[in-house]
């Protein structure tokens, strides 16, 4: 099962001690794309050694999709990071 990054734990709010829950801010894990790319390279290596040209093409497709997923997940993770507070200048 794929695990996504967990949101932060709720913080206590004031003297009452009631937890203040933040909105769920999960971000996709780029290791999923890296794993797909690595699996595609492995398929390419095995298929190339066996002279299985169509399987090699499938491995190329898996590796390319994995690379796209990796770049997409890194971009989404970067966009979802909190912006630093500005100090007036």
Image (spheres, grey):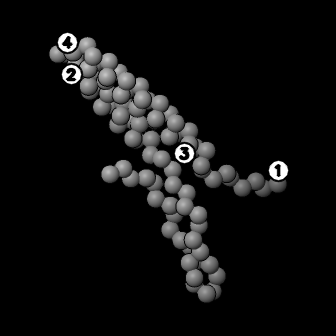
Residue 27's place in the image compared with 73, above or below, is below
Give the labeled residue for mark 4.
51
Instruction: Specify which label sits upstream in the sequence, 4 or 3.
Output: 4
* Local secondary structure at mark 1: loop
Residue 89 placed where, x, y %?
82, 50
Left or right placement of residue 66 versus residue 52 in this view: right
Q: Residues within 10 Å of mark 1 (few under 14, many from 20)?
A: few
Q: CA distance from mark 4 to mark 2?
A: 9 Å
Camera-near label (3 vs 2) is: 2
Based on the displayed image, in which of its 4 quarters is residue 23 positioned? bottom right
The answer for how far apart the CA atoms under marks 3 and 2 are is 33 Å
Q: Are marks 3 and 1 in contact (CB under 8 Å)?
A: no
Q: Residue furthest right?
A: 88
Residue at the disc numbered 1:
89
CA separation, marks 3 and 1? 27 Å
Q: Which residue is mark 2?
A: 46
Check if mark 1's residue and mark 4's residue have beta carbons within 8 Å: no
- Label 1, label 4: how far apart the Cα atoms are: 63 Å
Disc 3: which residue? 77
Quarter-of-image position of residue 12 = bottom right
């Amino acid at each position: 099962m794929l695990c996504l990054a967990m949101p932060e734990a709720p913080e206590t709010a004031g003297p009452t001690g009631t937890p203040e829950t933040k909105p769920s801010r999960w971000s996709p894990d780029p290791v999923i794309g890296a794993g797909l790319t690595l699996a595609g390279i492995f398929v390419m290596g095995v298929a190339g050694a066996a002279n299985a040209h169509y399987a090699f093409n499938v491995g190329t497709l898996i590796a390319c999709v994995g690379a796209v997923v990796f770049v997409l997940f890194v971009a989404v993770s970067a966009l979802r990071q909190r912006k630093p507070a500005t100090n007036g200048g």
